């Protein structure tokens, strides 16, 4: 039986890239009376269960998924964490 790995992919905007969703959320929080909110950043996250012979193979598969579909390398930085599912 091939092991299953759960990959968590957190996709963040690179420094210097505008984040209008985060800025609008920060403004809305302030309008609701929340004080002291320094910054709000939007993040996309994916949880993927992957069949792979090893953790190395699972990570390689998820990195390829990021390159081909999940991430725009010009504006995004992916962070991948893996564990056995």
Image (cartoon, rainbow, N blue to C red):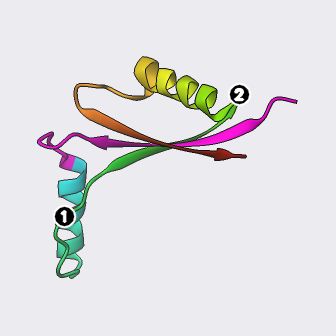
Image quadrant assignment for residue 24: bottom left
Q: Earlier in the sequence, mark 2 or mark 1?
A: 1
- Nearer the observer: mark 2 or 1; the answer is 2
Residue in the picture at 59% in, 30% down: 56
Q: Which mark is residue 39?
A: 1
Quadrant of the frame with the N terminus: top right
| Dots 2, 1 in contact, CB < 8 A | no
Q: Which mark is residue 10?
A: none
| Residue farthest top in this picture | 68
Find residue 57 and report its horizontal and vertical position in percent. 62, 25
Crowdedness of circle 1 by 10 Å Cα count: few (<14), some, many (20+)?
A: few
The residue lying toward the viewer, choosing from 34 and 62, is 62
Find residue 30 and report its horizontal and vertical position in percent. 18, 74
The residue lying toward the viewer, choosing from 13 and 33, is 13
Find residue 21 and report its horizontal and vertical position in percent. 24, 50
Asked if the stretch drawn in magenta spans residue 18, the answer is yes
Total count of labels: 2
Crowdedness of circle 2 by 10 Å Cα count: few (<14), some, many (20+)?
A: some
> Which residue corresponds to mark 2?
52
Residue in the picture at 35% in, 48% down: 43
For the residue labelled by badge 2, is the local secondary structure a helix, a strand or a loop? loop
Find residue 29 and report its horizontal and vertical position in percent. 24, 71
Residue in the picture at 78% in, 35% down: 3
Q: Judge from the rendering whether residue 36 lies leftward or rightward of residue 55; answer left or right.
A: left
Q: Is residue 11 above or below residue 2?
A: below
Magenta segment: 1-20
Q: Judge from the rendering whether residue 24 lies leftward or rightward of residue 5; answer left or right.
A: left
């Amino acid at each position: 039986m091939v092991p299953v790995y759960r990959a968590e992919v957190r996709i963040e905007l690179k420094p210097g890239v505008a984040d209008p969703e985060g800025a609008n959320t920060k403004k809305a929080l302030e309008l609701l009376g929340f004080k002291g909110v320094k910054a709000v950043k939007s993040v996309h996250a994916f949880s993927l269960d992957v069949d792979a012979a090893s953790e190395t193979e699972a990570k390689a598969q998820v990195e390829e998924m990021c390159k081909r579909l999940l991430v725009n390398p010009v504006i995004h930085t992916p962070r991948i964490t893996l564990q056995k599912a």
